[in-house]
Structure formats: structure tokens, C-alpha cells
């Protein structure tokens, strides 16, 4: 979400997404509120610190992780207040192990932790333990909630393709095979228990790997889906994978204006996708959550609010379009 006020962001989320709210993230507050730093606050016995190029492992906990933990605690305070009496699904988001390994540097070099399999194993174990504690804390604060854990993995396709550069930029870190990729994701998802989502707003989303990891759903940007990837998507959907389908970009709202039929357009895109992958359109209403294309940190507060409102409106329109189709 945009801005630096967690109370305002949380209020917007609960107002516009009354059926499926989520814990606000505000990376505009700086280090510790960013994707990597926020997850760093959850790591157990694996301290990190900020570096000129981002985050790196440290010898001992310091003020950077303390700040990240403080920001997260404040966000949880606002969530607890807004969600009093809430019963239903509640989503929380955490940077996944592969993106974390691609964005945290080793202590003795500037290479990503991804370059050291032992470091990746330690990082995954630490993250899994921290995520389990985080989920337990959310459940304690909002006892009526059914917590949905989303692992944000924008770097997953690059990790699997061997496209993540070393510190020098002259080499690439060896690709990760499907089984290894799924195993690390599974370790974190299973530690939390409940329903899990793996979100990747990059091209070439590995839907079979996400399904193999035990996720109940995959989040992706429909605008980046290539025709050649639709077969793997169809297979994953047939095997029971749900979809958090990103179809409404906030920049589209800015360009088209609030009077445009964007929610209806988004619903039609979902219906069209379902036809292309050979699925009965009626199944879309049970398998799809309509979301923004990706994060809204770059939007204005008003743009973010409108984007979420349009997602909710598109979700209401989709069953109507399918019923009209017969």
C-alpha cells in the first residue's frame, strides 16, 4: 500500500475488501518496511543488517532489525484494532525463501545468499520458524480469523532459470531445479499451517512448482501470462490450484478515469482466460480471487482505494457474466 500511515492503509483495506482483508504493508517508510526487511524481522537466530546494496547477514542483531520489528508490530496493532470481531479469511504476506535468498547478501561477500546452498537451508529454516510465530501472533490478535499465508516470490522465475547475478555481475548463480524450488517453499508454507498462497508478479510463473509446494493458490499478473504458459496453468487448475489473478493495474485507473468500465473488463478477461484454458466458466467463481496486477506501493492513496474497490466490483460482476453466458 502507498504512504506511511498504517492506520489509514488498514482502514482502506477493511473498507474496500470486506470479504478478504489483509495486513497492510507500507514500504514507503523505508528500510525495514520493504519486502526483504519486513521478512528479516521474522528471522530466528539469523540477524541481518542494511548494507549499501540492500540487506546482508550480520554477526549480531542491531538497530535495523529492531526497526523492522517495530514497524511490523505497529502494523499488527492497527490490524488488531480494525479487525475486532472479524471472522473470515485474513491474508498476511511474507517474502518467500527464494526471493529472500536472492536479496540478502552473505556476510563475507556481496554475493546473494542464493550462491551458498547451506545459507539457503539456514535461511529457509529460520524463516519457517519465524513465519510460524508470526501466524500464531496474528491468530492471537484476531482469534476469529482464518489466516491465509502468502509468500511473495517475485524472484522465483529468475532463481529457477539461473538468472540471478553474482556480486560482480559477470556470472549467474546456478539454476534451481523444480524439486528443490518446491521443497523450500513447502518448508515455509507447512510451518504456518492452513491455506497458503505463492505470489509471483513476474513473467514465467512456475505454476506446477507452486502446486507441488503444497500451496492452495498462486497469485500472478494476468498481463504477463504468455500463451505458451497456459497449458501448465490449466493443469495446475485442474489439480485444484486456486488463482489470485492480477487484472487491475493502478496505472490503468489513472489513465482511464473512474468512469471507465474497468471492473467489467477485468471480469471479462477472467472469463476469457477460463475459456482458453478449457475450464468451465462457472468454475471460475469458486477458483479465482480478483486482485490488483501487483503491489500498490507506487499508487496514490486515492488510486489504491479505487483499485481495491474495482477488484471487489469485478468480483461481483464475474458471476453475472457467467450466468448471462449460460
Image (tube, rainbow, N blue to C red):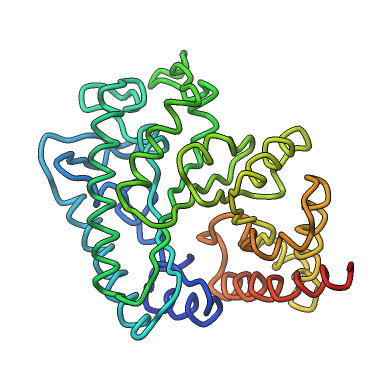
Q: Position of residue 148 (x, y in %)?
A: 42, 61
Is residue 73 rendered to the left or right of residue 79? Answer: left
Is residue 56 rendered to the left or right of residue 321? Answer: left
Viewer-proximal residue among 198 and 13? 198
Query: How many numbered marks have been drawn onto this rendered protein structure?
Result: 0
Q: Residue at point 80% right, 73% down?
A: 260
Q: Residue at point 26% right, 22% down?
A: 118
Q: Residue furthest right?
A: 325
Picture quadrant of residue 77: bottom left
Q: Position of residue 53 (x, y in %)?
A: 35, 35
Q: Residue at point 30% right, 30% down?
A: 105
Q: Residue furthest left?
A: 60
Q: Residue at point 59% right, 39% down?
A: 207
Is residue 26 depicted above or below 209 in this figure?
Answer: below
Q: Position of residue 265 (x, y in %)?
A: 80, 65
Is residue 245 depicted above or below 228 in this figure?
Answer: below
Q: Quadrant of the C terminus?
A: bottom right
Q: Residue furthest top?
A: 170
Viewer-proximal residue among 98 and 326? 326
Is residue 113 depicted above or below 95 in this figure?
Answer: above
Is residue 78 depicted above or below 114 in this figure?
Answer: below
Is residue 137 rendered to the left or right of residue 200? Answer: left
Viewer-proximal residue among 307 and 291? 291
Q: Position of residue 290 (x, y in %)?
A: 64, 63
Q: Residue furthest front?
A: 239
Viewer-proximal residue among 154 and 285? 285
Amino acid at each position: 500500500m502507498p504512504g506511511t500511515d498504517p492506520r489509514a492503509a488498514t482502514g482502506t483495506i477493511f473498507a474496500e475488501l470486506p470479504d478478504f482483508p489483509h495486513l497492510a504493508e507500507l514500504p514507503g517508510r523505508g528500510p525495514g518496511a520493504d519486502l526483504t526487511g519486513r521478512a528479516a524481522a521474522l528471522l530466528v537466530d539469523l540477524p541481518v543488517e542494511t548494507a549499501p546494496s540492500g540487506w546482508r547477514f550480520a554477526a549480531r542483531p542491531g538497530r535495523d532489525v529492531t526497526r523492522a520489528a517495530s514497524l511490523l508490530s505497529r502494523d499488527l496493532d492497527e490490524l488488531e484494532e480494525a479487525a475486532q470481531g472479524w471472522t473470515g479469511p485474513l491474508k498476511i504476506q511474507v517474502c518467500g525463501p527464494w526471493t529472500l535468498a536472492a536479496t540478502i547478501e552473505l556476510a563475507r561477500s556481496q554475493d546473494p545468499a542464493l550462491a551458498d546452498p547451506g545459507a539457503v537451508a539456514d535461511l529457509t529454516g529460520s524463516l519457517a520458524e519465524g513465519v510460524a510465530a508470526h501466524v500464531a501472533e496474528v491468530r492471537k490478535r484476531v482469534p476469529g480469523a482464518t489466516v491465509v499465508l502468502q509468500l511473495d516470490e517475485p524472484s522465483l522465475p529468475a532463481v529457477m532459470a539461473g538468472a540471478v547475478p553474482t556480486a560482480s555481475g559477470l556470472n549467474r548463480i546456478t539454476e534451481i531445479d523444480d524439486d528443490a524450488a518446491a521443497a523450500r517453499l513447502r518448508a515455509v508454507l507447512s510451518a504456518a499451517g492452513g491455506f497458503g498462497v505463492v505470489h509471483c508478479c513476474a513473467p514465467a510463473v512456475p505454476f506446477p512448482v507452486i502446486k507441488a509446494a503444497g500451496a492452495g493458490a498462486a497469485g500472478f499478473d494476468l498481463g504477463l501470462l504468455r500463451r505458451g504458459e497456459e497449458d501448465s496453468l490449466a493443469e495446475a487448475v485442474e489439480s485444484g490450484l486456486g488463482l489470485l489473478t492480477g487484472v487491475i493495474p493502478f496505472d490503468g485507473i489513472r489513465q482511464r478515469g473512474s468512469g471507465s468500465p474497468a471492473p467489467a473488463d477485468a471480469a471479462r478477461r477472467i472469463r476469457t482466460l477460463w475459456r482458453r484454458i478449457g475450464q468451465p466458466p462457472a468454475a471460475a467463481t469458486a477458483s479465482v480471487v480478483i486482485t490488483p496486477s501487483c503491489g500498490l506501493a507506487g499508487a496514490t492513496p486515492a488510486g489504491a482505494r479505487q483499485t481495491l474497490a474495482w477488484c471487489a466490483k469485478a468480483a461481483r460482476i464475474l458471476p453475472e457474466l457467467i450466468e448471462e453466458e449460460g
